[in-house]
Amino acid sequence: MEMRGGARRAGGRWASLASMSPEVGHGATTPEGARSQEAMPPSGGSGPGQPPSLRGGAPAQERALGAQGQQTVRKLLEAGLAEFDERGFQAVRVDDVVRRAKTSHGTFYLYFLNKDDLLRALLRDALHDMERVTDEFPVVTSDEAGRAALRTWVQGFCDTYSAHATVIRILSQAEIVGEEVYGDGLQLLFRLAEAITQGMTAAGAGDRADAGGGLAEHAELTAVALMMMLERVNYLLSVEVRLPRAEMVDRLTSIMYAAFHSA
């Protein structure tokens, strides 16, 4: 493993989710050793299939954006994402975003209240895509088809995390984000744990009914542990440690499969 110089460390709250109650709520693979290059999806409006962020921030919510307005929002989002990635959220000012976007402060405030509002727009995209991945968690049967389905899902999770890594890293820094923003991410993580739990118990009921229910006995805690493993490994892949991505996907799959089908 090779540690990347100058990497930002994981924050306290995101790294300690396993100690919190679930009652709180709700691409292409990056080459090995290369940091993911995040980009906004192709332009074309904020209708079906378009990222939620293209609706803009709070000032833009009460009006319909035309093509020019959507393009301006896109420029600001791309500029903000690049600045957050390079400087870190705390160090970025609205000045930096408008300078990179080659626009004015007045234009910025037509679409966003401040940099926090811009971050929330980017977060909507991350949550939207992670919700889709969560909903796709399969029932993992105790055969090669089940293992293959699980590996496909793990690969999809890693790709989605990589696409939104800058925003997720900001969420991992507890002192930066507000409780509302942090809570949205927390709710989604526990939704993921619930999806894993359902996959585990469904597989156990279908394939291990003669095991006396042992597989499901600690399903929720096991799911939280797997969720934390997925999040932390992907965090490291995105910011700190250079690891062979394909091999890591294989190892994550094997660990999760063993948790589903342990004796």
Image: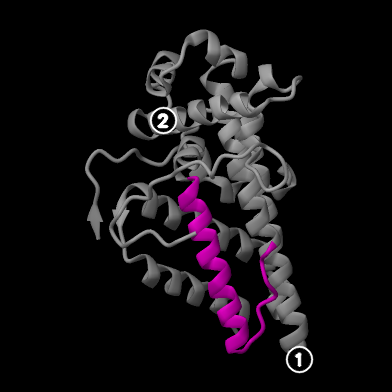
Evaluate whether residue 212 shows in this view. Answer: no
Evaluate whether residue 245 shows in this view. Answer: yes
Q: How would you classify the magenta stretch by its main secondary structure?
A: helix
Residue 241 at what x, y percent from top left? 30, 54
Q: Nearer the viewer, mark 2 or mark 1?
A: 2
Q: Which residue is mark 1?
A: 210
Indicate the amino acid at tag 2. Answer: Phe
Q: Which residue is mark 2?
A: 84
Q: Where the C terminus falls, by quadrant?
A: bottom right
Question: From the viewer's perspective, is residue 25 above or below residue 56?
Answer: below
Residue 217 at what x, y percent from top left? 71, 72
Give, as a single range, the part of the protein colored magenta: 136-164
Indicate the amino acid at tag 1. Answer: Asp
The residue lying toward the viewer, choosing from 40 and 24, is: 40
Question: From the viewer's perspective, is residue 145 above or below residue 42?
Answer: below
The answer for how far apart the CA atoms under marks 2 and 1 are is: 52 Å
Q: Secondary structure at mark 1?
A: helix
Query: Reading the chain from its start, which is encountered first: label 2 or label 1?
Result: 2
Residue 22 at what x, y percent from top left? 70, 49
Could you tell me which residue is drawn at 68 percent across and 20 percent down? Answer: 60
The residue lying toward the viewer, choosing from 202 and 104, is: 104
Residue 248 is inside the magenta segment: no
